[in-house]
Image: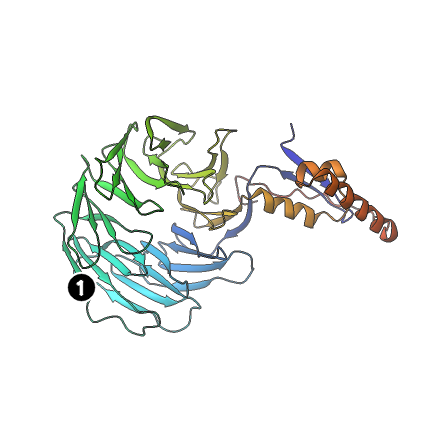
Amino acid sequence: EGERVATASEDRTVRIWRRDQPRITKILRGHQGPLVAASFDAEGERVLTASLDGTARLWSVDGEASPIVFRHGQELIFTAFETPGNRIVTASEASIRIWRADGTGEPLTIATEGPGFDAIALAESGIATATWDGQLRIWQLEQGAKAMPDSPVELGRLESAVLALAWDPRGRRLAAAAQDGSVHIWPSVSEPAQVLGRHQGAVEKVAFSPNGRSLVSSGKDNAARVWRLDGSREPMTLRGHQRAVRFADFSPNASQVATASDDDTVRVWQLDQLDTPRALTWHRDDVTVVRFSPDGRLLVSASKDGAALLWRLDGSGEPLVLWHRDAHGVPARVTAAEFSPEGTHLVTASLDHTARIWLIDTATLRGEIAATVQGCLDAEFRRSYLGETEAQARRAFARCAGQNSLTRRPAADGDGIQSSPSAPPGDS
């Protein structure tokens, strides 16, 4: 049915490719404990991972060099690139450390003398922190600073523990999700907090829309709420899940919200038509993360069932399944999933102690086929699988055939057969 492509080459190999299946380009091994986070830098050239083994590691997406290891010393709950990416921030419940991205020198450290850190968010405006007692602070650090400021900006104390923090895209407004169900926002670091409203249970996450005009909150009351930050209307309540909503994400144009729930489902909501959300059912356990691709055409969901799923938002086809399995072949919870800035790759992290980088861009895969196969691809193949026009395909085939007629050599005995991996369920 055209799902797979087989190519034969004068390099004495046959390769089998899935046209629409992501391919593992790299398995990031080295952590000695479960991974809790993984993210790309702004250029999509590096991946930062964080683990309960007390380290963060900085990996090159394309290179084979060993990762740079940042030894924090305690189980990590947060890690991020500091804009513009020349420093790394790691955090445990007891301390926050700011490292040079090349791994040299000693880190700057923020230590809590009382209750531990419960939530952290990073922006150019500074590092926002919340401790177990509901106290919020912002630590402002200039680029190139060699010491932490003497004192942070005090934002006050909420009556309830803070479960999540988020900066808006411009790093000016800060939002907080609280255990008592309240959602708070600071218009600026110099203004008092405003209470947007409440859920009927604890609020797990908050996230701003890409245009900064709205905020979505995810709650244990089985609902998500979308708040218009200009105060022009009541919040939109997204109901339909049967259990807690753990995560929510806006589409790039802010017209949709995707929600992930403990009822094993994902729902995609058109914000101008809330009564008919699209329910995505496949997972067999709690769904903990959901994210839109940068172009808004794909959605990734990650679950405790050991799978990350890639969904086409045009409704076509079945989801593509990206497995994480431990050394015994048992599916291991996927804790993080994030697209690269250009949308060509996806990184997933898991309790199996690994992160995996997947190639998901069809155009890039076509380029790999063209670069890998050394023989001549006929015009029909080039049109179908390399996306060339009929004229381009004919010219390319004729040019290749003419060159090979002058340089062709006989194949040696013992030709090998190699199958190109296409998102295998294990580490093979």
Where is residue 278? Give x, y as percent: 39, 28
Q: Nearer the viewer, residue 141 or 351?
A: 141
- Looking at the rendering, in which quadrant would you find the N terminus? top right
Name the amino acid, label 1.
Glu
Where is residue 25? Give x, y as percent: 56, 49
Where is residue 162? Give x, y as percent: 20, 49
Task: Tell me how many marks there are.
Answer: 1
Label 1's element? loop
Q: Is 48 located above or below residue 238 in the figure?
A: below
Q: Is 291 located above or below residue 111 in the figure?
A: above
Q: Nearer the viewer, residue 354 or 420?
A: 420
Is residue 165 rendered to the left or right of residue 377? left
Question: Outermost residue, left direction?
Answer: 159
The part of the image, by quadrant, that contains residue 81 is: bottom left
Q: Residue at x 47, y 43 (%)?
A: 295
- Looking at the rendering, in which quadrant would you find the C terminus? top right
Within 10 Å of disc 1 (Cα), the crowding (few <14, some 14-19, many 20+) is few
Q: Residue at x 81, y 44 (%)?
A: 398
Label 1 sits on residue = 113
Question: Outermost residue, top direction?
Answer: 276
Q: Nearer the viewer, residue 317 or 304?
A: 317
The part of the image, by quadrant, that contains residue 294 is: top left
Is residue 182 rendered to the left or right of residue 315? left
